[in-house]
Amino acid sequence: MTKFTVNDRPVQYRMDPDTPLLWALRDASNLTGTKYGCGTGHCGACTVDIDGDAVRSCQLSIRNAEGRFVTTIEGLSPDRGHPLQQVFAADNVSQCGYCIPGMIMTAAVLLKRNNDPSDEEIDAFVTNICRCGIYPRLRAAIRRAGRIMRGEEQVEAAPPPGVTPEDAARTVPALRRP
Amino acid sequence: MGRAPRKAVQRKDQSRGIDRRTLLVGAGASAGLLLAWAAWPRSYRPNLNAAAGETVFNAFLKIDRSGQIVVIVPQTEMGQGITTLLPQILADELGADWRTVGVQSAPVSPLYANSLLARQWLANDWTRIAGDAGDWAIDQYATRKALMLTGGGTSVPMFHKSYREAGAAARVLLCQAAAARWDVAWESCDIQNGIISDGGQRKLKIGEVAEEAAAFGLPEILPFRQGQADRLAGQDLPRLDTPSKIDGSHNFAADIRLPDMVFASIRQGPVGDAVFKSADEAAARRVTGFLKLVRNDRWVAAVAANWWAANKALDLADPVFELTGAQLSSERIEAALEQGFSSSSGQRLYSQGDLAPLFDNAAIVASEFSVDPGLHLALEPMCATARVTDDAAEIWMAAQAPGLARAAIADALGFGESAVTVYPLHAGGSFGRRMDVEAGVQAALIARDMGRPVQLLWSRLEDVIQDRPSAPAHARMAAKLGRNGMIDGWLAKVAAPCGMSQTWDRIARRKPPHEAARDSAESSTRLAVAGMELPYALPNWAVDHFPVDPGLPIGFAPGNARLHGAFFTESFVDELAHQAGIEPISFRIQMLGGNPRLAHCLTTVGAMGGWQGGIEGSGQGLAAHQMDGAYAAVMVEAAISGGKLSVSRIIAAVDGGDQINPDIARQQVESGLVYGLALAMGASVPYAKAMPRRAIMGRMGLPRLADIGEISVELVRSSAPPAELTEAGAPLVAPAIANALFTVTGQRFRKLPLLPRT
């Protein structure tokens, strides 16, 4: 009983049903944006969105994911266009980057429920661990993403992936068409 | 603008062999913004691959026909932004459009040797006495061995000049190619935003002349770019590694996927001289997807179709190890450190003036301090992916010493080094841990045994057991205050193992960790008391180091020995200020007459933070420190509420010279501050029976967002050469908090972590 939906696609994993979702995503689906950090549900690097909840995927077996709707960082947006992704780029939040998918997935769930959270609500919800120390930029980035979601602000910081050389040459005078 | 003739440079070159750094310093001092181009090590050619349409300009730069600037970076990205900083230096000199700049990792080559870290690391006191000759010998060694190293905050100071030179050289070549087409003097041409112009109407894109430019010869003198307009240096340009890190597409070593690849988890036994004895393979076989147990003298790995199955199989196999020698425990660490003070290997490593007559029959202020080993706990556990055939190996891993990693892997496989390719990946944290190379060696051996590609990922438990933490240390501090409130005499005795020495023994001499720990206890070294060389002008002071082997192998960390050195020094300075009845900033500044940069950081942090003079009840404390071209002061506001440490504000003022990318510089400082906060709060475990007593990430006392108050970083404007600020913040947070807690509790906090944990 390991059938569910991952990033809008129906999947069935032929793995031990006790396998934590994290490892099905990483090692069977090659969705490696979801990271292993501790395996005990503390660090939050493996956080995914399941039916609108931020879930630490190392703590949920694929048996218990039956019928549910899983979204990973790969499925959050097709083009790095989620407000949190754009703000993380604009505010230069990420350092080593390992905690970032889990941070973004956690914050995305928070903002989906409440796009104007207080600092206290942010602190209570985002309990992920970052060792590089992105914390000093994190609350402001989440609030800014909230403002974007409320239509009060716009930001465009990171380009979408897959820009063709032709498109790049049209935008950047220093480039030639290959 | 003056010009230094090439001949003079060559003469100097011949008389001393290649000591590029001295040459460049010499040329710079006498001739301004000039480049000793002839000193470039010409005997080594770049070993870069060029894709179709790419032209190799030098070891640091390729340019594509379409105008893409590909900057080659030998340094390991661990979040510190080095894969943006070095390209930014080059792109600034070149005149590139930042949107056209990309970055690639460097292959192993002598051209990328980090002689600056090698000097710090390998210089014992003998080479210090030998002076330049000792440095020269180390430089030669580092180059010949292709000693590529990332650590100790050396990347920017080491390579700043090389990237400027590489960018300037490419700019001149491109200008020459364009000038030849236009039949004008190349000196009249310039490059801005990736467009070459002759100063008038004629313009060419870089990509249009890249191929022909490489064929031009370099002039004897390369001019550096003049003027401040349209410069990329000094701007908060976006990091090149950001896009892939916000959408989950960035590949760390455990994200590599190869055809037919399988997954491995490993056990290496308890801490110490442990040898693998046996495991229950039948139990492991019950796990779906389990493939094999791979056995080695000192470890055993389970391999399976997915990592969770591999790790579960290993749990069920319940490996047994045999431990020789005393069992590591917290009590043993403490006892070893205390006994260290009577070790005959102890030596006075810094000495100024004469303490003996001063301390004789005088009133001495004395305090004892201790620091627990600090765990790295990088969010990415140790990992590597390997593909090994009969005669070649490929390893994907994050390695702060990729050349030594390659050598160790080749040695383990019985291959020549040229048969091994290490693909350098970014580290998911590291904090010094990836100076060690064992995960790459293990992955290669397992892959060979399996006959198919293997991805090895250590479990968090394994990562904690086999961490090589920052050093535990004890200090006995003593000082005599003068009548005017000045410090007349200062003596610091420190018992500590040396993480840098042990790491070298492990990765270059291939000693097992427990042997490296034992052997490094035989000699004292300044590396173990870094940060205790006083920035303050005192007439009489000394620092003694007593080497120790507490049975716990240790390694590199942000700030290395400064993590304990600054804690001891800055906590004790604060005690002396209190004894002298002088406000702590004034107390320090009266001894900083010769150190205006550090004094300025102190006054700045005081002004920014609303310093109330360290008075009782203020909850404010501060600490200051200097290191390798960086000067920093940190002020905090802290309290203990409900038995828990709470730090509501951390303010840092840092003078790190003329920073290339100020926002990345601030990130580096912020990172250090949070790392330092973790050491103040926890990031350590008790040990018993040769094992850590807990290994769960949630019980390490690590700060989470809710533990972070206001953190602000002020970069002091400076025209000094840029320092790297990765090491600046971490050592200062704990002493600043300890000093702040004294104002609210009246108690001194002389242990790290600051509050006892159960």
Image (cartoon, grey):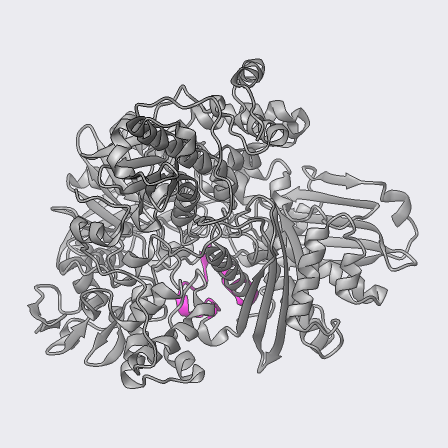
- Residue B313 sits in which quadrant? bottom left
Res. A118 visible in picture: yes
Nearer to me, A82 or B312: A82
Instruction: Tell whether position B680 is magenta.
Output: yes
Nearer to me, B181 or B302: B181
- For the N terminus of chain B, the quadrant is top right
Tell me which residue sits at (13%, 56%) in the image.
B289
- Residue B481 sits in which quadrant? bottom right
Span shown in magenta: B678-703
Q: Position of residue B587 (x, y in %)?
A: 79, 61
Q: Position of residue B446 (x, y in %)?
A: 23, 42
Q: Position of residue B87 (x, y in %)?
A: 39, 44
Q: Position of residue B279 (x, y in %)?
A: 26, 50
When the figure is inspected, residue A176 is found, relative to residue B332, above or below; the finding is above
Instruction: Tell whether position B121 is magenta.
Output: no
Q: Is residue B446 left or right of residue B31?
A: left
Tell me which residue sits at (23%, 48%) in the image.
B455
Tell me which residue sits at (47%, 25%) in the image.
B37
Q: Is residue B74 left or right of residue B673?
A: left
When the figure is inspected, residue B128 is found, relative to residue B294, above or below; the finding is above
